[in-house]
């Protein structure tokens, strides 16, 4: 067979593409993600929260029981499937609270008292992909489990607010906090009866889904973006008017702390959140900079969930923050990520000295310097071009003659008229600081 025949026989292979709504995060964008995650970790640490990691796949029943059967997530958005090997019903996690609660119970983790946890992770929801809404997306979230008082509700809200502000966002300009109190089960059911009566009086306004949900989940009928329903929703009986003394005391406790800390909020009686497990405090940080994907973070108290999932009853509160939306918002308002730059780029005119060069680079990295090697052989001109494009502060030029004398040239790339200096490659530790502090 000739080379030509060989070529004819290899049919062109169609490249595969990522699943719709699931994104690759590549450099330099990935550096913005790392910056965001590091900023967030530094805040979480200051509140004494610890990292938790749970599986991406869980039994489907966990989400059906945890999130609620009559919710968008469970009814329409969940990637649920059967394990081909054994027929188990499994799902990709659409959120992480249910998984964290399962893990706490499975490992009796609350035995010796409450836990304050945080996570970062990918979540999956089968939604229509658009800006700020994807089928695989990422959340940072916190869960404080085992604490009943309003102090911890306020703590997670203060922490969320600090996260946003330390990223460079301005309260009132780029985001605002909405707060509500959902009370307890008995209060919600009294309100629910009044609400159903109200919805029945306006039945003709509701679409088929609304009419179905009117009885199964009437609060969700109000949590609508449909402008035709706004007036009816605004006139609906308010849960806040059905709250008893204990719920009001809890709500006022949260508010007193936020007021003292100077955290602005708007009480939104219509805020119910899209998951069934919440009670008492619920909150969202919203922005008007991202169109209808305006919720960057949402959370609340879920005192009944642990017991509902088979664990020993314990109160809990938490929130989840969408990282894609955070990055979109930061970009929208012009916050620039601080991305680390390379200290140095190593230019190697001849391969003869490579072992010596690479040993020197190892010594530099050992001293904390970030240095990228020019790979393979190319002209000085093209190596300098790459050095410039790398964003490095210095070029390290390992010329053949200099190398023979144990020397390397340091050339500043970012400073106008910066002088080139010679340094000894056998005592890197003596001058590494010049690169680190440049
Ligand atoms: P929305 O009302 O926008 O659908 P949600 O109430 O479903 O949001 P939560 O379940 O509370 O959202 O999730 C917490 C956060 O995760 C949201 O505030 C948002 O920032 C982010 N988020 C939720 N769904 C998506 C998605 N499909 N793509 C990107 N981010 C998302
Ligand atoms: Mg949603």
Image (cartoon, rainbow, N blue to C red):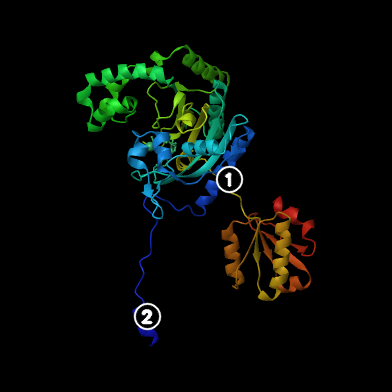
Say which of 118 and 347 sits in front. Answer: 118
Circle 2 crowding by C-alpha within 10 Å: few under 14, some 14–19, many from 20: few
Q: State the residue at coordinates (68%, 61%).
A: 411
User: Residue at the bottom extreme?
Assistant: 1
Q: Secondary structure at mark 1?
A: loop
Which of the 4 quarters of the picture holds residue 35? top right
Q: Position of residue 377 (x, y in %)?
A: 60, 73
Percent position of residue 236, x then y: 31, 18
Whole-number angstrom distance, CA of label 1 to CA of label 2: 48 Å
61 on left or right of 229: right
Q: How many marks?
A: 2
- Given residues 381 and 112, the one toward you in this image is 112
The quarter in which the N terminus is drawn is bottom left
User: At 50% across and 44% down in the image, what residue appears?
Assistant: 121
Dividing the image into four equal quarters, which quarter contains ligand 2? top left
Which label number is shown at residue 338? 1
Any mark on residue 7, and which? Answer: 2
Left or right: residue 207 compared with residue 298: left
Q: In the displayed structure, would residue 324 be above or below residue 156?
A: below
Q: Position of residue 338 (x, y in %)?
A: 58, 45
SS under mark 2: helix
């Amino acid at each position: 067979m000739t080379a030509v025949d060989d070529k004819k026989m290899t049919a062109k292979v169609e490249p595969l593409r990522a699943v719709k709504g699931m994104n690759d995060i590549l450099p330099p964008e990935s550096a913005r993600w790392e910056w965001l995650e590091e900023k967030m970790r530094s805040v979480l640490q200051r509140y004494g929260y610890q990292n938790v990691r749970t599986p991406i796949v869980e039994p489907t029943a966990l989400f059906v029981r945890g999130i609620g059967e009559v919710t968008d997530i469970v009814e329409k958005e969940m990637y649920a499937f059967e394990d081909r090997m054994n027929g188990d019903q499994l799902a990709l996690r659409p959120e992480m609270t249910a998984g964290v609660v399962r893990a706490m119970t499975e490992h009796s983790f609350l035995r010796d008292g409450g836990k304050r946890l945080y996570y970062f992770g990918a979540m999956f929801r089968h939604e229509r992909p658009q800006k700020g809404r994807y089928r695989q997306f990422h959340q940072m979230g916190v869960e404080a489990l085992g604490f009943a008082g309003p102090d911890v509700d306020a703590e997670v809200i203060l922490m969320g607010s600090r996260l946003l502000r330390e990223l460079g966002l301005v309260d009132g300009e780029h985001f605002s906090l909405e707060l509500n109190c959902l009370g307890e089960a008995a209060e919600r059911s009294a309100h629910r009866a009044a609400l159903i009566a109200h919805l029945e009086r306006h039945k003709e306004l509701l679409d088929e889904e609304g009419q179905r949900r009117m009885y199964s989940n009437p609060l969700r009928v109000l949590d609508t973006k449909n402008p035709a329903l706004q007036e009816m929703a605004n006139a609906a009986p308010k849960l806040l008017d059905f709250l008893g003394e204990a719920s009001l005391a809890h709500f006022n406790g949260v508010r007193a702390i936020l007021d003292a800390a100077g955290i602005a909020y708007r009480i939104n009686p219509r805020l119910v959140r899209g998951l069934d497990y919440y009670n008492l405090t619920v909150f969202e940080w919203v922005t008007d900079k991202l169109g209808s994907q305006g919720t960057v973070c949402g959370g609340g108290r879920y005192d009944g969930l642990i017991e509902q999932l088979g664990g020993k009853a314990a109160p809990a509160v938490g929130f989840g923050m969408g990282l894609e939306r955070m990055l979109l918002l930061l970009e929208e308002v012009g916050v620039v990520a601080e991305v680390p730059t390379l200290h140095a780029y190593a230019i190697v005119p001849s391969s003869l000295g490579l072992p010596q060069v690479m040993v020197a680079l190892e010594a530099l990295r050992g001293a904390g310097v970030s240095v990228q090697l020019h790979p393979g052989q190319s002209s000085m001109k093209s190596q300098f071009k790459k050095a410039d494009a790398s964003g490095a502060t210095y070029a390290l030029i390992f010329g053949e003659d200099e190398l023979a004398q144990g020397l390397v040239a340091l050339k500043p790339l970012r400073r106008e008229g910066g002088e080139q200096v010679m340094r000894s490659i056998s005592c890197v530790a003596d001058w590494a600081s010049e690169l680190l502090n440049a």
